[in-house]
Image (cartoon, rainbow, N blue to C red):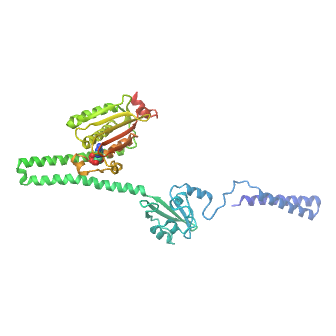
């Protein structure tokens, strides 16, 4: 294809030749025509050389791509390096933050300083697709996946992908399955053992049979509670991003839960006292989940609080548009090192005590998920030898509806 430059040059040459011919015909002198021709060509070349019709040229390229390419690489949140002949020629912002700002110009094995990375980067054969796992780069518990690729002009691109979060999530999943299986296997083994004993001669003795059946019943109930809590947890997690839409009056709900506990928890439920701030209105919530939250928190205060001491529920306005629900007990309290871990699934301060009191180790994990679904926050404060206060702060109904939640407006109408 003829370039624009060649087209303009050819057109100009024809005009210059035409001008020279005209001078020759008018003047009849060959030297005048020659001077005209040379002059016209000179003017033409100068004009073509200085005029630019197209867009400005791209910035000059350096060893590894234009400024634009560098800007694109800098915008990538994960570390990316360009390497030529084993030397780092460019590192984006994330790479400099992870490995240091001095990496450009360094041998890439020195820049990354990880044995697994060094093996892959030392090889001159084209990079394979297989990623390399780098553990401990940056900080001891960080995990990276290193991928490399070769460019057509012989540079190597090194891309580091942070897998720390994924790895932690996978480890949590594996631990959860292992813990849940263990928690279910223990009562199941106990039930099977008692069935075996009852089918032997022990089953003949009515007193022994009654005692064994009671143990089997308790163990089966324990499995049932665990399965129910596991189902609750997965349901709440599945609904995590779906905002609740009912208006729930927490004062009414507290009274309902208290009445239910008086029916099932006997004397200890009489220790429950509730103080409700009259200025507090409803919240936008899921009634069944909020009831479960109250059952779990009041249940814990009754279980771990000293018998006969009060379990105090308070409902009060907190910061603007926020309601604080707190449940306080009097007990030996919880040592500070345990507090950050109490919402982990199956974490217990004293597993034996929790089991003997009917605990599953999932109650506070469920509460935390319910609070998060309601855009609330869970706080646990405890003083050893004094007691524990668990608080949940939740947005008041007005705060949620004023943000334009159509369902809420409908529910309030
Ligand atoms: P559990 O079913 O074991 O009660 P939770 O998830 O509800 O499980 O609580 C986790 C652990 O936190 C409990 O095993 C217990 O050690 C501790 N805990 C929770 N609430 C209280 C409380 N009010 N007082 C003292 N310890 C508590």
Total numbered circles: 0
Q: Is residue 297 left or right of residue 41?
A: left
- Pick the quarter of the image with the N terminus: bottom right
Which residue corresponds to the image point at 56% horizontal and 70% vertical from the top-left? 85
The quadrant in which residue 225 appears is: top left
> Looking at the image, can residue 361 be seen?
no
Residue 320 in percent (x, y) is at 44, 34
Residue 302 in percent (x, y) is at 25, 40
Q: Is residue 239 above or below residue 137?
A: above
> Looking at the image, can residue 147 be seen?
yes
Residue 157 in percent (x, y) is at 53, 64
Residue 295 in percent (x, y) is at 28, 39
- Pick the quarter of the image with the C terminus: top left
Q: Is residue 66 left or right of residue 341?
A: right
The residue closer to the viewer here, 22 or 378, is 378
Q: Is residue 146 above or below residue 291?
A: below
Which residue corresponds to the image point at 37% horizontal and 42% vertical from the top-left? 378
Q: Is residue 227 left or right of residue 21?
A: left
Q: Residue furthest front?
A: 385
The quadrant in which residue 363 appears is: top left
The residue closer to the viewer here, 188 or 363, is 363
Which residue corresponds to the image point at 47% horizontal and 59% vertical from the top-left? 161
Which residue corresponds to the image point at 92% horizontal and 62% vertical from the top-left? 32
The quadrant in which residue 21 appears is: bottom right
The residue closer to the viewer here, 36 or 125, is 125
């Amino acid at each position: 294809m003829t370039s624009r430059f060649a087209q303009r040059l050819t057109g100009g040459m024809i005009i210059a030749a035409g001008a020279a011919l005209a001078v020759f015909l008018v003047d009849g002198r060959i030297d005048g025509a020659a001077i005209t021709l040379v002059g016209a060509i000179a003017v033409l070349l100068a004009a073509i050389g200085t005029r630019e019709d197209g867009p400005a040229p791209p910035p000059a390229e350096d060893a590894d791509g234009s400024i634009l390419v560098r800007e694109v690489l800098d915008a990538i949140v994960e570390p990316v390096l360009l390497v030529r002949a084993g030397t780092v020629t460019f590192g984006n912002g994330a790479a400099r933050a992870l490995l240091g700002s001095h990496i450009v110009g360094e041998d890439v094995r020195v820049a990354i300083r990880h044995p697994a990375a060094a093996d892959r980067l030392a090889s001159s054969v084209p990079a394979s697709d297989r990623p390399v796992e780098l553990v401990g780069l940056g900080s001891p518990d960080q995990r990276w996946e290193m991928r490399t690729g070769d460019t057509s002009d012989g540079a190597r691109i090194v891309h580091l992908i942070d897998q720390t979060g994924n790895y932690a999530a996978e480890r949590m999943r594996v631990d959860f399955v292992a813990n849940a299986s263990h928690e279910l296997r223990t009562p199941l083994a106990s039930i099977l053992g008692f069935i075996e004993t009852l089918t032997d001669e022990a089953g003949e003795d009515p007193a022994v049979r009654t005692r064994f059946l009671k143990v089997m019943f308790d163990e089966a109930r324990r499995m049932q509670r665990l399965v129910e809590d596991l189902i609750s947890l997965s349901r709440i997690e599945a609904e995590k991003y779906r905002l609740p839409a009912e208006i729930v009056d927490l004062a009414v709900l507290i009274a309902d839960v208290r009445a239910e506990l008086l029916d099932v928890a006997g004397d200890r439920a009489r220790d429950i006292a509730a103080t409700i701030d009259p200025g507090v209105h409803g919240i936008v919530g899921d009634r069944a989940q909020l009831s479960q939250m109250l059952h779990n928190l009041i249940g814990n205060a009754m279980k771990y609080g000293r018998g006969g001491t009060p379990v105090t529920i308070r409902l009060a306005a907190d910061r603007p548009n926020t309601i604080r629900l707190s449940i306080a007990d009097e007990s030996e309290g919880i040592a500070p090192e345990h507090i950050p871990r109490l919402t982990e699934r199956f974490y217990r301060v004293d597993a034996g005590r929790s089991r003997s009191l009917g605990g599953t180790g999932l109650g506070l994990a469920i509460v935390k998920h319910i609070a998060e679904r309601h855009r609330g926050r869970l706080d646990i404060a405890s003083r050893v030898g004094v007691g524990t206060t668990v608080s949940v702060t939740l947005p008041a109904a007005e705060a949620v509806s004023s943000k334009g939640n159509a369902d809420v407006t409908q529910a309030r109408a």
